[in-house]
Amino acid sequence: MISIKSDREIELMKEAGRLVGETHKYLKQFIKEGITTIELDRLAEDFIRKNGGIPTEKGYEGYPASICASVNDEVVHGIPGKRKLKNGDIITIDMVISYKGYQADSAWTYAVGEISKEKKYLMEHTEKALYEGLKQVKPGNRLGDVSHAIQEYAESHNLSVVRELSGHGIGTEMHEDPDIPNYGKKGTGILLKKGMTLAIEPMLNLGKRDIAILNDDWTIVTLDGSDSAHYEHTVVVTSDGCEIITKRLD
């Protein structure tokens, strides 16, 4: 069932979202050659807890870290570890933060040093695909309008859409109804209504859309080894559109 949030619930989610944005801003300064992904995880957890939040991902279905840190061909759910970032890498930091029981979720892909023009292209157009989807989030539109806008933009820029993974509703739980695919048909799916809270998150590949899961049972990679990018915001459906509550504050 898709829940409509009260004004009080939305205010709590906005506080969670503000902390997500602040944590992304805080981590950005450390994303450079030589740092390990586990160091980024520790920095994130310390910052989140010092600022009154809880890193929801830690312990979720056994996940061992406070953030997901996915590098290059890792699409999602990369587990932080001893891997050192190298010049030319791209890394997606995905985090969910709880504040007084309410969640906000955002992912962003970052460049490490000087990256290739292909990686720049991937990052630019995956981010733009997110905003094309967000333009369609408003009362009276259907979920398929959002999904279609993301797919149309991605494929028109020769990027492939990962189909096995999707956005989702969010609130007191990290994942709530509905699922929000990054592909679909206009005019289909549920009707969007004021007060819905959604996490929209295109995951796009430079190569083919096929994916595989590694032996750690978490990390998902592109099957052909091509680079992948991932951008995500949590939004509230308003009377005439949507409000992004996980804005990056930089």
Image (tube, grey):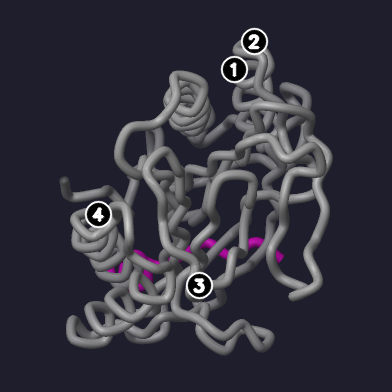
Mark 3 and mark 4: Cα distance apart in space: 16 Å
Residue 235 visible in the picture: no
Instruction: Give the magenta part as a residue range.
Output: 1-11
Mark 2 and mark 4: Cα distance apart in space: 30 Å
Residue mark closest to the camera, 1 vs 3:
3
The tag on residue 28 is 4
Side (left or right) of 175 relative to 246? right
- Residue visible at 81% across and 43% down? 223
Mark 1 and mark 4: Cα distance apart in space: 27 Å
Q: Amino acid at mark 1?
A: Tyr
The tag on residue 153 is 1
Q: Amino acid at mark 3?
A: Pro
The tag on residue 80 is 3
- Residue visible at 53% across and 30% down? 133
SS class of the residue under badge 1?
Answer: helix
Mark 3 and mark 2: Cα distance apart in space: 33 Å
- Quarter of the figure with the N terminus: bottom right
SS class of the residue under badge 2?
Answer: helix
Residue 222 to residue 136: above or below: below
- Percent position of residue 75, x then y: 64, 49
Place residue 73 in its image quadrant. top right
Residue mark closest to the camera, 3 vs 2:
3
Residue 58 visible in the picture: yes
- Percent position of residue 128, x then y: 45, 25
Side (left or right) of 171 relative to 75? left
Q: Looking at the image, tell me whether mark 1 or mark 3 is earlier in sequence order.
A: 3
- Residue visible at 68% across and 85% down? 61
Mark 1 in CB contact with mark 4 (< 8 angstroms): no
Q: Looking at the image, tell me whether mark 3 or mark 4 is earlier in sequence order.
A: 4
